[in-house]
Image (cartoon, grey):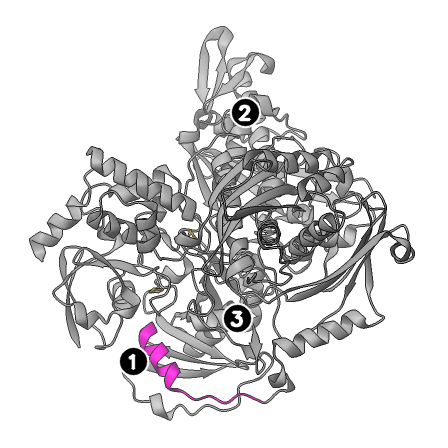
């Protein structure tokens, strides 16, 4: 069937079976390969994207179910800015190792900060349940705190880029 | 042991467009050990392991014969080259070498770098067997065995940088007609301070290319380093935060089809029959491909291929292994351990006679299960067979070996096969030679679909159930202390290779260390830190038990047995110091310590644990590391941090069990990994001993399981002797 998707602020039309997970539509039909496949059962978070600004695991959401909703992938997170605050903190703290899980981690962290601008360690533990086989957790925690600090200081534009785009098209 | 010697071959020439290209190859000879080092067919002389290019625009390109798996090797190796070249770091780029024989890295065969420093006394009795095992499996160009920096880096990259620098100086001196000794280099330029002249490397490259390369280029001493030893940001990181980094699974070739596969659940079984009619008319489904032991579906999308595959009901041949499960396999190991046949790994004194008369003797049996690698990127490979050529896009730890697999599967010669190695979403040993089954499958499927390219992606279930698992091992230990509470006997027997990993770093007079053979139908392979992952747990748990039997404090007990091994002792002391070992931890918590040498690095870890809701919670880990010299402190720290989490997954979180001949687990729901909430705070400190360079990718792994087990004992008085630890 033909699906109408709003991805990173752009209206896209794709052909896919009704039950095709959003993940595979993003990766194969739209060539947005920054969103990764890790498990297919919503257990690892490698496929995390934002649906209307909130983190969601795209391997377990049929693309057909999110038509018309604002979908943001790692490629669109910065929303026209050079980098989102979380991406910047990820570089400053040299978080990624193999990097495969990191798109999902960053999307999960950005979603957390959008809801909770100053998360505690407990908040991070509760909200960030993505898996990283390389074991970068120590740095992820540090980078989330750093991003929160940068956002609160106004050093960087928080999630504005992303949200304004979604608002515009959503 | 024989003396290590080496020959390096430096070759230089002009680049098209007027630059300098330079390559370094090497052969090492160790008398009596030729069999270990190389195939001895003389080809090694042609293996140039390192290349660098200097273009007229003054850009330096380092060509690195190792894949990036997240260990920062591309950055570290490029740093070593740039350092000796005196290059401006901002004008240096890196390229990964293609899978061609000239880039094969023979250096991995050697654990200890010849001529660099003495082999540490403690390790003299065994060559680095972990590395040796990896080497023997393959056709070189491997990234594994923690060898990249200490082999390629130390011997290849530095020599290449130093040789090019020498040639550039010579070219400048000639041009200016001044003595070579009056020229200096700095930030990618040659300078003649006397006449205030300078020229960039790019300007000199064409002239330099006409000169003979030096035979023994002068290398810097560590105190002159300006790049090496600094926490230089990793080259690959920016692309890993914006989704632009490309992995094997992201490859897109025009006209590409998608495939997914289901192999026989019981290892060793073959495909019987499969009825393709139920999926024949599904939209987008192209073909059902029968392989020897698997069935694959090819479709125009992964999702369609997966759905169709799940509809099929293939039958597989019956095998006797179907009756095996974890318990029967353990009984088989038990029988092997009781049998008369064993291989001596090490012995000294007379352990058997001494234990009888000792003041106190103890025994213990330890067990560790099979484990999956579970790289975050599931196995995948893309292949195209057309016009008598085979092309493969995949991420592997040894592209040359994978190319050979592709050649065999396609029926073509290796030189008709091109392998484009991709960034790896984790390796940990899963993508080493001997484990390239996914490449074999992709090529066979592509052959059926020729000339269309096919991307094969394994489901996570396929990945967990068809790994080359970390071997399950049972170890039986006996030890004794004398009347002065000093350990005098160490007897161990276990299944598997053991090798270096089974040696004990402590001074114990009477030792008898033996291995027994155990074959099983379960596929086994190298898992990050190889045998050290099991033996670190065994040795460091049992030495803790001996300390307890002797009535001694476990840290002091170990320390007292390391007089002969000052580096080990210093590492142990440092871990105790940074963890505040002497001071009591918070109420309800306890600490454990462990010390393991692997891949030339010595690591001690202290773990602080608490039991929360009947589960082990590791709050803090402190690690002290002596890897000789730290090339990049930040990536080195990251490798140890990652190793600790990787080791923790085995210590507390997961296991692979066998039921009815097949793997019982299938995805992260039943093969759980630690999450951020489970991750301890980690503090890593290095000791710069300037000993031979050790690895960093693996040595962080082995000490964590015993450190946690020892902490659990300190906390509960209960000795847990099998992994994953349960209380
Ligand atoms: S791939 Fe979606 S959660 Fe793992
Ligand atoms: S960085 Fe490799 S899985 Fe997270």
Report crowding for label 3: few under 14, some 14 to 19, many 20 or more residues within 10 A (C-alpha): many
Which chain's residue wears label 1?
Answer: B
> Quarter containing ligand 1?
bottom left
Residue at image mark 3? B440
Indicate which disc, 2 or 3, sits on the residue closer to the N terminus. Answer: 2
Which mark sits nearer the N-terminus, 1 or 2?
Answer: 2
> What is the crowding at mark 1: few (fewer than 14 residues within 10 Å), some, or many (at least 20)?
some
**Quarter-of-image position of residue B362:** bottom right
Q: Is residue B579 magenta?
A: no
Residue at image mark 1: B284
Residue B148 figure quarter: top right
Q: Residue furthest front?
A: B587
Chain of residue at mark 2? B
Q: From mark 1 to mark 3, how far is it between C-alphas? A: 24 Å
* Relative image position of residue B190 (x, y in whole percent): 49, 19
Query: Residue at point 50% right, 45% down?
Result: B587
Say if disc 1 is inside 8 Å of ligand 1: no
Q: Position of residue B489 (x, y in %)?
A: 83, 52
Which chain letter goes with mark 3? B
How many other residues sit within 10 Å of disc 2, few (<14), some (14-19) or many (≥20)? some
In the rendering, at what x and y percent does residue B245 appear? 36, 51
Measure the alpha-carbon separation of dots 2 and 3.
45 Å
The residue that disc 2 covers is: B225
* Residue sitting at x 50%, y 31%: B82
Q: Which residues are magenta?
A: B301-317
Q: Earlier in the sequence, mark 1 or mark 3?
A: 1
Of discs 1 and 2, which sits in the foreground?
Answer: 2
């Amino acid at each position: 069937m033909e699906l109408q998707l709003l991805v990173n602020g752009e209206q896209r039309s794709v052909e896919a079976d009704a039950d095709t997970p959003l993940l595979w539509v993003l990766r194969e039909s739209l060539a947005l390969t920054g969103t990764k496949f890790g498990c297919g059962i919503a257990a690892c978070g490698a496929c995390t994207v934002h649906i209307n600004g909130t983190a969601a695991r795209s391997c377990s959401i049929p693309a057909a179910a999110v038509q018309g909703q604002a979908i943001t992938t790692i490629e669109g997170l910065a929303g026209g800015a050079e980098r989102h605050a979380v991406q910047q903190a990820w570089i400053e703290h040299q978080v990624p190792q193999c990097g495969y899980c990191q798109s999902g981690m960053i999307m999960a962290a950005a979603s957390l900060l959008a809801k909770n601008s100053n998360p505690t360690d407990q908040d991070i533990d509760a909200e960030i349940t993505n898996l990283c086989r390389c074991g970068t957790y120590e740095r992820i925690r540090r980078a989330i705190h750093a991003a929160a600090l940068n956002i609160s200081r106004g050093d960087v534009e928080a999630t504005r880029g992303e949200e304004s785009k979604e608002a515009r098209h959503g | 042991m024989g003396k290590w010697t080496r020959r390096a071959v430096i070759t230089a020439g002009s680049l098209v467009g007027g630059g300098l290209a330079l390559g370094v190859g090497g052969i090492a000879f160790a008398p009596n050990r030729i069999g270990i080092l190389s195939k001895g067919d003389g080809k090694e002389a042609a293996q140039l392991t390192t290349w660098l290019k200097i273009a007229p625009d003054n850009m330096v390109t380092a060509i690195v014969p190792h894949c990036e798996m997240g260990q920062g090797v591309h950055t570290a190796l490029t740093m070593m080259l740039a350092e000796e070249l005196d290059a401006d770091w901002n004008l240096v780029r890196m390229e990964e070498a293609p899978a061609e024989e000239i880039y094969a890295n023979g250096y991995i065969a050697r654990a200890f770098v010849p001529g660099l420093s003495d082999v540490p006394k403690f390790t003299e009795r065994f060559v680095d067997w972990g590395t040796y095992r990896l080497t023997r499996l393959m056709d070189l160009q491997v990234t594994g065995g923690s060898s990249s920096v200490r082999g390629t880096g130390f011997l290849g990259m530095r020599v290449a940088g130093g040789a090019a620098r020498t040639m550039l100086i010579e070219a400048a001196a000639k041009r200016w007609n001044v003595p070579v000794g009056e020229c200096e280099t700095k930030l990618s330029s040659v300078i003649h301070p006397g006449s205030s002249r300078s020229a960039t490397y790019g300007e000199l490259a064409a002239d330099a290319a006409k000169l003979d390369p030096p035979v023994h280029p002068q290398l810097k001493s560590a105190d002159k380093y300006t790049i090496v030893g600094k926490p230089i940001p990793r080259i690959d990181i920016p692309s890993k935060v914006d989704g632009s980094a490309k992995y094997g699974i992201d490859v897109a070739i025009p006209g590409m089809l998608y495939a997914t596969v289901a192999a026989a659940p019981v290892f060793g079984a073959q495909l019987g029959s499969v009825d393709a009619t139920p999926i024949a008319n599904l939209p987008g489904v192209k073909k059902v491909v029968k392989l020897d032991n698997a069935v694959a579906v090819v479709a125009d999308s992964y999702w369609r291929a997966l759905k169709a595959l799940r509809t099929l009901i293939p039958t597989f041949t019956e095998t006797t292994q179907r009756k095996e499960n974890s318990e029967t396999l353990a009984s088989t190991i038990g029988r092997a351990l009781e049998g008369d046949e064993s291989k001596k790994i090490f012995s000294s004194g007379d352990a058997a006679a001494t234990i009888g008369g000792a003041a106190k003797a103890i025994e213990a049996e330890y067990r560790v299960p099979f484990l999956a690698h579970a790289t975050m990127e599931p196995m995948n490979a893309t292949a195209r067979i057309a016009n008598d050529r085979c092309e493969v896009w995949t991420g592997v730890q040894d592209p040359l070996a994978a190319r050979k697999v592709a050649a065999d599967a396609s029926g073509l010669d290796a030189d008709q096969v091109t392998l484009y190695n991709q960034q790896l979403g984790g390796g940990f040993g899963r993508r080493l030679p001997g484990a390239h089954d996914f490449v074999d499958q992709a090529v066979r499927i592509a052959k059926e679909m020729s000339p269309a390219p096919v991307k094969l992606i394994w489901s996570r279930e396929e990945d967990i159930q068809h790994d080359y698992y970390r071997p399950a091992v049972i170890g039986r230990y006996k030890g004794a202390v004398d009347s002065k509470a000093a350990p005098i006997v160490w007897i161990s027997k276990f299944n598997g290779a053991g090798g270096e990993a089974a040696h004990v770093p402590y001074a114990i007079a009477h030792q008898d260390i033996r291995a027994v053979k155990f074959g099983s139908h379960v596929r086994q392979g190298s898992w990050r830190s190889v045998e050290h992952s099991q033996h670190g747990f065994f040795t460091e748990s049992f030495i803790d038990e001996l300390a307890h039997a002797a009535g001694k404090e476990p840290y002091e007990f170990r320390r007292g047995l390391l007089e002969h091994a000052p580096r080990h002792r210093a590492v142990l002391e440092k871990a105790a110091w940074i963890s505040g070992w002497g001071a009591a931890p918070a109420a309800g918590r306890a600490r454990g310590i462990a010390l393991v040498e692997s891949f030339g690095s010595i690591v001690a870890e202290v773990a602080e644990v608490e039991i929360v809701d009947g589960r082990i919670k590791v709050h803090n880990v402190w690690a002290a590391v002596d890897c000789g010299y730290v090339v990049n402190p930040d990536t080195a720290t990251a490798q140890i941090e990652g190793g600790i989490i990787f080791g923790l997954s085995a210590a507390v979180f997961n296991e692979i069990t066998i039921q009815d001949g097949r793997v019982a687990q299938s995805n992260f729901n039943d093969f759980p990994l630690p999450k951020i909430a489970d991750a301890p705070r980690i503090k890593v400190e290095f000791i710069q001993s300037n000993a031979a360079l050790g690895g960093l990718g693996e040595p962080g792994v082995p000490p964590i399981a015993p450190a946690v087990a020892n902490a659990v004992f300190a906390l509960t008085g209960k000795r847990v002797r099998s992994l994953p630890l349960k209380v």
